[in-house]
Image (cartoon, coloured by chain):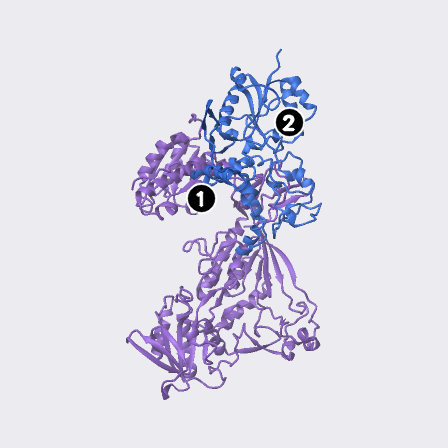
Amino acid sequence: MSTNNGKPKVGVYVCHCGTNIAHTVDVEQVRDWAAQALGAEGVVIARDYKFMCSSPGQELIEKDIKELGLERVVVAACSPHLHEMTFRNASKRAGLNPYLTELASIREQVSWVHTDKGLATEKAKAVVAGAVERVVKNEPLDEIKVPIHPATLVVGGGITGIQAALEIANAGYKVYLVEREPSIGGHMAQFDKTFPTLDCAACILTPRMFETGMHPNIELLTWSEVTQVAGYVGNFTVTIKKKPRYLKEELCTGCRICVEKCPKKVIDHVYEAGIGYRKAIYTSSAQAVPKFPVIDTANCNFFQKGTCKVCEKSCPTNAIDYEQKEQFLKVDVGNIILATGYDLFDARRVSNYGYGRLANVFTSIEFERMCNAAGPTSGKIVLRDGQTTPKTVGIIHCVGSRDRNYNNYCSSICCMQSLKFAHLVKERTGATVYDFYIDMRTPMKSYDEFYQRVLEEGTLFVRGKVAQVSDAARNAQEEGKLIIQVEDTLVGKQRRIPVDMVILSTGMQPRHDAKEVGKLFGIGCSSDGWFTEKHAKLDPVATMTEGVLIAGTAAGPKDIPASVAQGSAAAARVLNLIMRHEVTLEPIKAIIKQWQCSGCRICNGLCPFNAISFRAERRVSEINPALCQGCGTCVAACPAGAISGSGFSNDQILAQIDGLLMDVNPVSA
Amino acid sequence: MSKPKFAMYWSGSCGGCEIAVINIHEKILDVDANFEVAFWPVAVDAKVKDVEALADGDILLTLWNGSIRNEENEHMAHLLRRKSKLLVAFGSCATEGCVPGLANLSPLSEIIDTAYTTLTTDNPNNIRPQHVTKVPEGEISIPVLKDRVYTLAQVVDVDYFMPGCPPESHQIAAVIDLVIQVLQGKAELPPKGAVIGAGSSTVCEDCPRKRNVKSIKAFHRIQEIAPLDPELCILEQGIPCNGPATRSGCNARCPRVGAQCIGCYGPAEGVVDYGARLLTAFASVIDANEPEEIERILDGIPDPAGQFYRFNLADSLFRAGAPAFKN
């Protein structure tokens, strides 16, 4: 290799990306400019190609590395997020250290965000110049391989979390399943029937719950929450808070005598959705897994007034322990699956539908509990008085969804849920059912057939968004009824339809604490609040944080089959990693230059991965390279400049800025 | 054999650096023993024309203290650069602009207006200094101020940098010792561009105070909280101490006596912008998440420019505030 003005030989490759880039950037001009203007910076060859990421595109680079002896490569194409690995691997195949290849994003940062071709081309040149000046300063880095801990943490014990846990456990690997409620089962455990097959939810779910509870590879941690996550893919250390149940699980047989004897009845706002009761010591249902009850201290006579202790007296195994304290467990896991589910939209927010004010307006979850044979009405569909069977029922779709006042998105399950309700009302009461929809969305397997069935059963469909539910009668017919005011858009008329009962098909919402949970696990949320996937189409269960996966409704509204599929998909991703036994980490790490560190400890509390420790005896701070994820937080914070990030040195960054500012002359458009 | 020549010059600065040199006490005799003082306006009587008469590179060592404020400073810098083998930026003003550099926050016109019109100024005719003034005897001139304050290295090539406001006497003595040893062939000069007479770490290195993981809930001015815990890190007590970002070399003089470091030894090795470094460091250890709370804590630093750039604005990435550039 001959000398090149003392600079490493750089090859620049400008991608058209079909027309994605070429439509807005004059690719040939960028190529020619790079070859001429950047010659002094070390560029010896500049080429363009229709699709650099294609095999012939990559081969172009490999050939030049071998034949021209390129020592650095700049690919001006899409964002590093998409193809950095592609081109690093191409360089690697040709014998060049992969970290001597840089991607200049002229698609996401140039062609996609600009319209003026002249100006966009000038900006593309600047971005390329920045990458060239930077890549010259790059140093070869070696990938780091670390072993993967074979255990997995699954957060959320709904059907998605259960599915994921069982898949992994059945493959022979340990799973910690953390659930914040006393029992696993999630929302599905509250339902009666599942669409479109009308399987009984409990019949298909409880065997899975039971299997999960009994599985030798699954450690069930219910009534528990994750409080801290440290580490990185393959090697997380997770702190879990186990809330006190006030009973010794090792002694409890699950006989529920304590529940029966407990004198304190409380409205159950969680499992029974506010329309049923439970005791102050309770399990969510008779099928709860695990079987151990929990004392609700806010409502327990003993905890509130100091007397009672009926549960303690009645327990045949002396399992009750009023002194129990919360416990903190630390577990090591290699991967984490977040299946934290959804919250129901609060129907009170749509005040014109009267929920909470008009007694016989019900939410979908209330109706689910009402239909459930084990629910508060033993499966009878009745009005709020608990006795009267309705003669006419109105079901309203899209409550809180597809509405710019609440949530813009479609909650995806409400149409089918409403159709299921229509069917159940018909089947059990013979009532006249009106179904108010905006658009009917029944796209999955056997869904539209179910819609046809409900149509044939005689449910009356009204296409239109309901304006108001009121009890203000205008005539004798409306007296004592709930009146649904709606524009029937198929007829083109305003209608007032009197009914006995209204069911609001409420949508799904991100968990109220999704943002904090995302922060805890180092992942982000979309503007709607759902966890963000790594790639919406091609990587729907991965996140930007390696080793943290998402599944089910935590990532957006879904029905049961889709949630289960995602649970399995996330498990497959985890098993894939576990079975590789080791994970390759990016060698982008922060290093503390010991002779420059004065031990001021500014950095000590900042590391999100707890990689920094203070060596009191030498009065310096140190970074554990296995824990460091190269985020750069400490590099920015070190006041002494004693910490540098490999791959992101001051030299590299300043060189890149120099390059970016190289071509500041505005062109006449 | 004639002794090698030594020079020291004073440009835009307070003069403290000159005093610091004298403060090395009897060591000053070593300077006299080993050097011929060719030019040192404070100490010996020599004229600029004497320097001009010297051959280029005739002076072995010139210690330059002061910033480049006016054209005369710049002219002298070029002259002494030419005549000196080793030119040392001596003290904070020469290396990084120091307090005179804070003038770079304001446009020149405003600086002059402030100096000649404030209430305490007796200037009934509203006179402004002129470059050339006609007097009965002829014309007299004073140097024109430059658009902003420059460091020595922004004007001429500098061999070594010696930080401090002023440099500590023991560090000056050590540097003089080193040069004498080099003359005697007993030591080698450090690489060009090196910072001499200072450490490579920060003030915390020499500070005996106990330090913990930091989390700051409020910043105070030192007079607002008394007494200070004599054992504990000053920054942890909420006093914005610049020690963590400031180059070691002073033996942590101020923190040792219970005063916060104000940063006169400049940035540590490899730091591009002292103020930005310190700013991110302070911001990193503020213990708050709500924007209003963060604002409230930051309000505890009433003069951010003075806090973070007191000594190095002229040498910072900014060089000067935006108004000064508009001038």
The reply, left or right, for residue A55 in relation to residue A299 is left
The reply, left or right, for residue A246 in relation to residue A349 is right
Q: Secondary structure at mark 2?
A: helix
How many marks are shown on the rendered structure?
2
The reply, left or right, for residue A630 in relation to residue A113 is right
Quarter in which the C terminus of chain B is drawn: top left
A53 versus A426 height, above or below: above
Image coordinates of residue B159 in percent, x first then y, are: 55, 25
> Which chain is represented by blue in the image?
B
Q: Disc 1 sits on a residue from what chain? A: A
Looking at the rendered structure, which numbered label has been put on residue A85?
Answer: 1
Which quadrant of the figure has residue A172? bottom right
Quarter in which the N terminus of chain B is drawn: top right
Q: Secondary structure at mark 1?
A: helix
The reply, left or right, for residue A375 in relation to residue A436 is right
> Which chain is represented by purple in the image?
A
Q: Residue at x 51, y 43 (%)?
A: A586
Image coordinates of residue B40 in percent, x first then y, are: 59, 22
A40 versus A276 height, above or below: above
User: Both on one chain, marks 2 and 1?
Assistant: no
Residue carrying label 2: B21
Contact between marks 2 and 1 (CB within 8 A): the answer is no
Identified by mark 1, the residue type is Met
Q: Residues within 10 Å of mark 1 (few under 14, many from 20)?
A: some
A277 versus A516 height, above or below: below
Image coordinates of residue A416 in percent, x first then y, are: 40, 71
**Residue A170 seen in the current view:** yes
